[in-house]
Structures are given as C-alpha cells and as structure tokens.
Image (cartoon, rainbow, N blue to C red):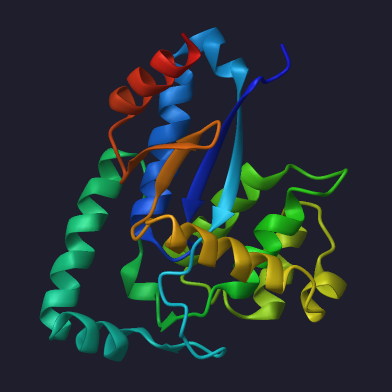
Amino acid sequence: MEPTRRIDVISDAICPWCWIGKANLDAALKLIGPAAAEFSVHWRPFQLNPDMPPEGVERAAYRARKFGSETRGAELDANVAEVGRKAGLEFRHDLMLRTPNTINAHRLLQWSGGQSTGPGQHEMAEALFRAYFHEGKDVGDLDTLAEIAATLGLDAAAFLASDELAEEVRAQDAYFRKIGISGVPSFAVDGRVLFSGAYPADQIAAALTRQAA
C-alpha cells in the first residue's frame, strides 16, 4: 500500500523530547497495525536556539544560565532521562559537553530525504538523536555530521561543505514560528497540527487512528 497520509514532525536535533516523541511515534505506528502503511513520516526543522553561535557553546555553562543553576539543569536532565528509559532510550548527559547550533544538522536531515539511495529521513533523525543524546557527539560539527551520514551509507561531505538548503531550513523554521509553534516536537497530519509534546504511544496511536478513519 502506498502512503496516502502525511505526518510532519517538527523538531530539533537537540530536543530530548523530540527523541522521546520519535520513539513514541514509532511505537504508535506499530500499535495501529496495517493502518500504519497509510502514513509517511517527514521531518521538518525548528531551532530551539536560533541565535546560537555557529560553533555552539559549552553545555553546562549554557544550561546553568538558562535554568538558573547547574543543579536545576541536572534535575531536568534526570527527569528527561527517566521518561526516556520508559520509551526504551538511554540518555547519556554525562557525555554531552556542548550545545550546538543545529542549522547543519537540519540541512543534513532535509538533504537525506531527497536522496534516491539510503535509508531516508526517519532513520537519519534517529541517527542524529542517538549521536547527540546517547553518544555525546557534537551534531553541529560538519565532520561529525559527515560521519553520521556515512554510518547510513551516505556521502554527505560535499553537501555539508556547501550552504545548500540553509536558506530553506531557515525559511521553514520561520514559517513554523509564524503560525504559532513555539515548542517541539509538534506533529501534523496532512498539514494540520494535531498536538505538541512527547505524547505516550497509545495517545498518538488513537490520534492517528482517528485521522485514518
């Protein structure tokens, strides 16, 4: 069966709830069984930190400034790690040393969806999330992004060295802000935003079932 419905996931590569949301979406698609074949999944860019320097910043200091103290930042990390474990994910905050600018990660994700070979956007999204949250890799670094792409059988070095898709990514990011999206992940079906947040798999499955009907 060819997919007839489109799921757009608006996300950022360094949003922990987006990795959890992806895991819950994958589980939801399994829950709805054959109806899952009606849906194709597409990843859309949103930058949590659009003014982040190109080289990123040291993560501990950044989170201390953002949340008031390193202790509060660690508490939030522990909370998201616990929710992640329930979704089958292991966050390694101890390995995450930098908060990167994600424009190039978004470029890579969009580019991967247009390749005639390779696993596609959904698998690239997983690879980016896992690289950052589980392996502590700097997903703002071009060489690191090229290595991530290579694990999926894609040669992205020349693309990453260019500015290709940068303006398209920024335009999509600006569009989502313009229509009122302020938090991610946000999920849309056939262009209609259904909800924002890492909803449990059964709730996502129920929403998709309603849409399929």
Tally of numbered discs:
0
State the image coordinates of residue 16 (x, y, percent, origin top left).
36, 58
> Viewer-proximal residue, 96 or 55?
55
- Left or right of 160? Residue 6 is left
Q: Which residue is drawn at 28% across and 45% down?
A: 85
Q: Can residue 90 be seen in this view?
A: no
Q: Residue at x 85, y 63 (%)?
A: 155
User: Would you identify the image quadrant in which residue 179 lies?
Assistant: bottom left
State the image coordinates of residue 199 (x, y, percent, origin top left).
29, 37
Q: Which residue is drawn at 67% across and 70% down?
A: 145
**Residue furthest out toward the front:** 178
State the image coordinates of residue 83 (x, y, percent, origin top left).
23, 47
User: Would you identify the image quadrant in which residue 42 lies?
Assistant: top right
> Viewer-proximal residue, 146 or 48?
48
Q: Which residue is drawn at 49% across and 87% down?
A: 56
- Left or right of 147? Residue 115 is right
- Left or right of 150? Residue 35 is left
Above or below 197: residue 78: below
Q: Can residue 107 be seen in this view?
A: yes
State the image coordinates of residue 55 (x, y, percent, origin top left).
55, 90
> Viewer-proximal residue, 122 or 11?
11
Quadrant of the rendering where the N terminus is positioned: top right
Above or below 49: residue 69: below
